[in-house]
Amino acid sequence: MELKDLAAISGKPGLYKIIKPARASIIVESFDHHRKKMVISANQRVSVLDEISVYTNNSEGSTPLIDVFQTIYREYGLEQALDDDATNAEYLSFFKTILPEYDQSRVYASDIKKIIRWYYLLLKESPQLITGASSEKDEEE
């Protein structure tokens, strides 16, 4: 599995594994222990994680989400850097240490909270996506 196989769906919490496209929709499965399947219609906004970037003030203009995840992992490993009850100021301060050049006028605390939640979900459900370590399935191929 890769980040291109996972998506965030506007208005729905968490991440979803893309199972397959259907006529004018896609079939997804929640990327948690529930593994609930559902059909998402074409009028809902679906963002594939591989295509998400964080706005920055550097020459590139953005940093891919996987780079942000890997930086968090390098800095904190499996340790949880923020509690669930952290304040907006704590999220902003944390993100400034991870990605100092992020565009503070375009990246909000709510965006950072979402990124951090996704990071911990990926770390729990599929850590090889962040750590770069291959899974046993990948080694067999």
Image (spheres, grey):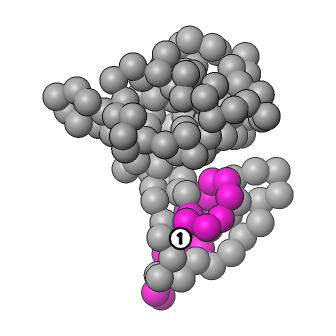
Residue 124: name its quadrant.
Answer: top right
Main structural element of the magenta stretch: helix, strand or loop? strand
Task: Give the residue at x 57% y 21%.
Answer: 94
Is the residue 124 above or below the residue 15 in the image?
above
Residue in front for this viewpoint, 92 or 70: 92
Quadrant where the N terminus sits is: top right
Residue at the farthest bottom position: 23
Residue in front for this viewpoint, 64 or 31: 64
Is the residue 7 above or below the residue 103 in the image?
below
Task: Give the residue at x 61% y 67%.
Answer: 11
Residue 140: name its quadrant.
Answer: top right
Task: Give the residue at x 20% y 32%.
Answer: 60
Residue at the farthest right position: 34
Residue 134 rendering spot, x and y as whole percentages? 56, 27
Is the residue 80 above or below the residue 129 in the image?
above
Is 53 covered by the magenta stretch? no
Q: In this view, does 13 lie to the left or right of 106?
A: right
Residue 54 rendering spot, x and y as whole percentages? 38, 39
What residue is disc 1 on?
20
**Secondary structure at numbered mark 1:** strand
| Magenta stretch bounds | 9-28
Q: In this view, does 113 lie to the left or right of 98?
A: right
Is the residue 66 above or below the residue 8 in the image?
above
Q: Pointer 1: residues within 10 angstroms few (<14), some, or many (20+)?
A: few
Is 24 covered by the magenta stretch? yes
Task: Give the residue at x 16% y 28%.
Answer: 59
Residue 138 rendering spot, x and y as whole percentages? 55, 35
Residue at the farthest left position: 59
**Residue 132 appears anywhere in the view:** no
Residue in front for this viewpoint, 124 or 71: 71
**Residue 24 appears anywhere in the view:** yes
Query: Looking at numbered disc 1 in the image, what kind of residue is underneath it?
Result: Lys
